[in-house]
Amino acid sequence: MESISSLWWAVIGSGIYHGINPGMGWPLAVSAALMNNKRSSLFTALGMLAFGHLLAMLSILLPFSLMTALAKHERELRIGAGVLVILMGIYLLINRKHPRFLSRVHPARLALWSFLAAMAHGAGLMLVPIYLGICATADSGHLAAQSIISGNVFNAITVGITHTLAMIFSGGVIALVTYYWLGLRFVSKTWFNLDIVWAISLVIVGVTAIFTSM
């Protein structure tokens, strides 16, 4: 069984990774601040990005928090989640095009854009095996189903918030440095695409989840 601390570090680490990835939106926060010529616009944009990202995480984690009451099927749930994550990673490796529908979202609707971007990239799905591992570390076999659900819903919310805070902190640091010193020209010249790395990491997480659940 995995160490609880290593699982929580995985939650934080995946959040930092999401924040660094330009595809999760920090360049949009810089752009909003430069266009409005207001520093406050950057923080407002980061807040909207964080809100949308958190909603995406919870929309995936909360349904699984209800399923974890089926404690006798815990292994099957973790294997199934691992398979889903692997399939998502393979899909992203095959289809490397950035989702076109994101370009149709108005720039002012950053929360909606962030939510859709996280869903399209399987960001919440990646957290599911980690979250199920956290739930499995608790010996809840003797508890009533209602108690299990309550505890796991709390875990789902905590995982989502922790992940999102790490995401917006790392992305926010890059956005601030870009806004004050580097400018959007730096982004256009040094744009780095982490989509392939992200897809491979999904496969690795899925394989790891299946292996540890056996």
Image (cartoon, helix red, strand yellow):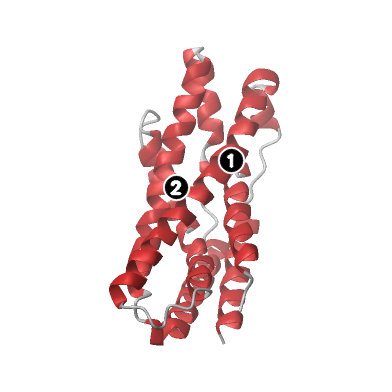
| Image quarter in which the N terminus is found | bottom right
Q: Sequence order check: which comes first, mark 1 or mark 2? A: 1
| Foreground residue among 13 and 99 | 13
Residue that carries the numbered disc 1 in the rendered image: 22
Residue 117 sits above or below residue 150 on the image: above
Quote the CA–CA distance across marks 1 and 2: 11 Å
Can see residue 121?
no
Residue 8's tag is none
**Residue under the point 46% across and 54% down:** 158
**Residue under the point 38% across and 45% down:** 101
Give x and y (percent) for residue 37: 51, 12
Mark 1 crowd level (few <14, some 14–19, many ≥20, 10 Å Cα): many
**Residue under the point 64% across and 47% down:** 193
**Residue under the point 39% across and 87% down:** 72
Residue 182 sits above or below residue 202 on the image: above
Judge from the rendering whether residue 186 lies leftward or rightward of residue 21; answer left or right. Answer: right
Q: Residue farthest to the front?
A: 142
| Foreground residue among 67 and 98 | 67
Can see residue 65?
yes
| Image quarter in which the C terminus is found | bottom right
Q: Amino acid at mark 2?
A: Ala
Which secondary structure lies at badge 1?
helix
Mark 2 crowd level (few <14, some 14–19, many ≥20, 10 Å Cα): many
Which secondary structure lies at badge 2?
helix
Residue that carries the numbered disc 2 in the rendered image: 117
Determine which quarter of the picture holds residue 11. bottom right
Q: Amino acid at mark 1?
A: Pro
Q: Residue farthest to the left?
A: 146
Give x and y (percent) for residue 65: 37, 67
Give x and y (percent) for residue 109: 36, 33
| Foreground residue among 90 and 114 | 114
Give x and y (percent) for residue 73: 40, 85
